[in-house]
Image (tube, helix red, strand yellow):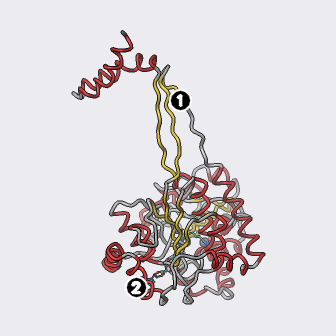
Amino acid sequence: MKTYLQPNKENWDHILQRPALDHSQLENTVAGVLQEIKAEGDAAVLRYTEKFDGVRPEHMLVTSEEIDRARKSLDPELKAAIQQAAQNIERFHASQHQEPQVVETMPGVSCWRKSVGIEKVGLYIPGGTAPLFSTVLMLGIPARLAGCREIVLCSPPTHQGGIHPAIIYTADLVGITKIFKIGGVQAIGAMAYGTESVPQVYKIFGPGNQYVTAAKQLVNKAGLPIDMPAGPSEVLVCADETADPEYVAADLLSQAEHGTDSQVVLIGFTEQFIQDVREAIDRQLEVLPRAEIARAALDNSAAMVVTERQEALEMINFYAPEHLILSLKQVDEFAEGVINAGSVFLGNYTPESVGDYASGTNHTLPTNGFARSYSGVSLDAFVKKITFQRLSPEGLRRLGPTVEAMAAAEELEAHKQAVSIRLRKLTN
Ligand SMILES: NC(=O)c1ccc[n+]([C@@H]2O[C@H](COP(=O)([O-])OP(=O)(O)OC[C@H]3O[C@@H](n4cnc5c(N)ncnc54)[C@H](O)[C@@H]3O)[C@@H](O)[C@H]2O)c1
Ligand SMILES: N[C@H](CO)Cc1c[nH]c[nH+]1
Ligand SMILES: [Zn+2]
């Protein structure tokens, strides 16, 4: 992690550069695999599962026996933790539900908007280096609350041809309709095009490695909606003298351990504070099982010393972090100025990990600066909003002439007639 003292605004772009992800070489390979899955269905999915995951599962769909086994084998303490997290996530996401509001735009003219769950959705749950069952909660719960009818989940098979029991248990808990032992490009292709076994879905969600991301981008280019451009995890911590350097170090490492291409940024107000955090990082790294990954991520990372809170705020909004931790005095006042961030963690007792697992907010968030224009996953991502309107005869009498005048001016006579024909009858 490089330290920059009072970096000039002109250098922010360079200092805060994300690790470059070059997808160009990948794209051809990924496009080829997708093409074969589209043409051959299950046969190609199985062929590539064998090639990339080194296993050919007996059946790709997880059976009810496998679900029973996962339920029985999982540690009761872990089950209780998953249930607690599920409760909080459900409570927060249920609060995002909006009842239709009927608005009378003028007397006799009523309009409203209703949210309807996307009928078939596909969730990708990473399973390469860590079985991310927390992501099942983050995607499965809002999908069910939104009323999605078919919720398909794909996750890579283990070398034994199964799926981690915590993923199966959580998927069953949140009401996933079909769980498949399919990972990587194969999973995205199968859900995008449909195969003999895997239903075709209308939108794909979920994080993944570079192959998954490239496949999602390609099917998206071809017209299938996806949740958002997700990428390697990142966190920016802005901390003053009220922060504990040990806590700050732990928070930075919590995201650095995700992957070698993760990035963490620290903004402090004195050189001494940055030095204290660096020393704490070194101490904590010594006992971290994923220290090698975290060290590589720290090489992509930066620490900054600034003097003014306003400058720190401008830097945050410029960078638009996926996660933002603010350990500052008068933190609420400072947070009011944040306009670009995926999710914000306030005070010394709100580590980013709580949002990753269990506070209630969603951990599927925009990375790579996309927080400037994208929100994280929420109930909204799983619904479409259909508008409705109804006019009474009085409503049409009042509004009809407006529409007639506009249709005539656009020289669309049939549009005008659809109103006029009714108005004539109403006046007779
Ligand atoms: N932004 C977020 O919200 C978020 C959240 C969690 C995880 N992540 C990221 O998700 C990623 C998870 O990656 P992962 O690898 O652990 O799991 P993964 O499930 O995304 O990928 C594993 C799959 O990659 C495929 N694969 C492996 N080598 C391949 C090759 N040479 N060619 C083609 N396909 C190949 C295999 O089919 C395998 O099933 C990490 O990068 C992590 O940072 C992001
Ligand atoms: N921090 C990740 C999103 O960037 C989500 C996650 C899952 N498990 C642990 N963390
Ligand atoms: Zn995390």
Q: Which numbered disc covers residue 141?
A: none
Q: Quadrant of the N terminus?
A: bottom right
Q: Label 2 belongs to which residue?
A: 47
Of callouts 1 and 2, the N-terminal one: 2
At mark 2, the secondary structure is helix
**Which amino acid does the dot numbered 1 rest on?**
Val
Left or right of 410 on screen, residue 151 = right
Q: Quadrant of the C terminus?
A: top left
Give the image quarter of residue 294: bottom right
User: Do tag 1 and tag 2 residues touch (Cβ < 8 Å)?
Assistant: no
Residue 90 x, y percent position in the rendering:
67, 57
**Which amino acid does the dot numbered 2 rest on?**
Arg
Please tell me which residue lies in front, 263 or 200. Answer: 200
The residue lying at 41 percent from left, 63 percent from top is 10
Please name which of the two marks, 1 or 2, marks the residue nearer to the observer.
Answer: 2
Asked whether mark 1 and ligand 1 are closer than 8 Å, the reply comes as: no
Residue 425 x, y percent position in the rendering:
35, 15
The residue lying at 42 percent from left, 72 percent from top is 196
Residue 317 x, y percent position in the rendering:
51, 57
Badge 1, how many Cα within 10 Å: few under 14, some, many 20+?
few
Please tell me which residue lies in front, 337 or 66. Answer: 66
State whether residue 95 is above or below residue 252. above
Q: Label 1 belongs to which residue?
A: 103
Cα–Cα span, label 1 and label 2: 55 Å
At mark 1, the secondary structure is strand
